[in-house]
Amino acid sequence: MKYFSLLLLAASAFAQAPRKLTLQEAEALAVQQHPQIAGAHLQTQAAGQVIRETRSAYYPQLSASATAVGAVDNSRIAAGFLNAPNVLNRAAAGVSLQQLVTDFGRTSHLVESSKLHEQSQESGEVTARASVLLEVDRAYFRALRAQAVVKTAEETVTARQLVVDQVTALFQSALKSQLDVSFASVNLSEAKLLLSTAENEVQEAFTDLSNALGMNGPQTFDLAEAVVAAAPEPDATGLIQQALQQRPELSGLRLDRDAALQFAQAERALVRPVVSGAAAAGGVPAHDSNLHGRYAAAGINVTIPVFNGSLFAARRSEAELRAQAAAERLHDAENRVAHDVNVAWLNANNAYQRIGLTDQLLAQANLALDLAQSRYDLGLSSIVELGQAQLNKTSAEIQHLTSRYDFQLQSANLKFQMGLLR
């Protein structure tokens, strides 16, 4: 029984172990299960059905009918416009066929417009995937940064606890004052506060990462370190040109513009004739003596628009104006992309420079702490100077480690702005 209980405890501990995860695995997991990506894919599939709907005008429209009528003898329909047809007893069944012969390009323009719209939806799907991947990368690096801060905070607590123990022992030996013990205790409390805040930030980061992965609840992870991004390019001009070519939302807007132009062409074709054919055939097994036992007919119909209160002209103008508006939206988006890429490049470049600067800052802080510790041990300085040196070192360590992850964050954002996250 005892052995069985130990097995249950071991199994429970194993089940609660954090899930190991690399950045590539996190991105692949988000692509598989994030609802935003799934929704965008469904929108693309729906747009594909619109092509089938529009193309259906090319094919014959075949329908079957069955009719039974009981009528008053020698009666006619006398009300309703100009028709007064006979109403006869009958029971019949037949089929009717309609086929578009030509509408002089209107349907072809509508089909092409729907194809372009589907391609635009595909670009929207790529955009949704890129946005999700950016959120995954951001949450991943924030979690790594928070974990690194926790580790630094734990080391700080350990170091300051050692100082408190030393100063307390010296106070008990009447070599240091109570003031020294109080200052050392304050520094220790600040370190513990830093640790508590850092641990909370880790949980927040894991919650954000779980949400970015498309999970319906927070989970903890054992995150692997990611490969450090390369230094940014010395100039943003080439990056902007690359982004204008590769950003999926720009591709989508170009396709939307082209789709609007095709639709405008279709609306211009409204004034052209429409030629269609129709045929019907069937049998009348029960019928009045005035009717034959079967029927069949076929014909060609030409519809020529003459006047409709300028409806077609207004529809054409509306479509052309919407196409122009789509072109202006594309132009505006290109300007915003150029701006966003330039800002992302500046931020990434600044973050890369901060890595070297924080290296120097940490080296100086370590040297200052060593000197302050030596001076304090020799009785040449107060606990205040030592505490300030400890604070400076902790701050430098946090800035040093956060600068590396900030550079990773800014590099991920730059990749997104350039259209490289897909």
Image (cartoon, rainbow, N blue to C red):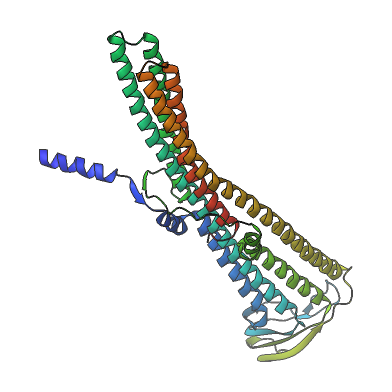
Looking at the image, residue 179 sits to the left or right of residue 125; the answer is left
**275 vs 400, nearest the viewer:** 400
Residue at figure coordinates x 68%, y 63% from the top left: 253
The quadrant in which the N terminus is found is top left
In the rendered view, would you say 32 is above or below 391? Answer: below
In which quadrant of the rendered view does residue 65 lie? bottom right
Q: How many marks?
A: 0
Looking at the image, residue 305 sits to the left or right of residue 216; the answer is right
In the rendered view, would you say 243 is above or below 282? Answer: above
Residue at figure coordinates x 82%, y 78% from the top left: 84
Question: Where residue 149 appears, x then y in whole percent?
Answer: 42, 36
In the rendered view, would you say 245 is above or below 34? Answer: below
In which quadrant of the rendered view does residue 115 lie? bottom right
**92 vs 322, nearest the viewer:** 322
Residue at figure coordinates x 44%, y 25% from the top left: 389
Looking at the image, residue 95 sits to the left or right of residue 170; the answer is right
**215 vs 186, nearest the viewer:** 186
Residue at figure coordinates x 67%, y 82% from the top left: 58
Does residue 196 appear in the picture of this structure? Answer: no
Looking at the image, residue 241 sits to the left or right of residue 399; the answer is right
Question: Where residue 217 appears, x then y in whole percent?
Answer: 42, 44
Does residue 110 appear in the picture of this structure? Answer: yes
**50 vs 229, nearest the viewer:** 229
In the rendered view, would you say 352 is above or below 315? Answer: above
Question: Where residue 293 appears, x then y in whole percent?
Answer: 65, 91
Question: Where residue 117 appears, x then y in whole percent?
Answer: 65, 68
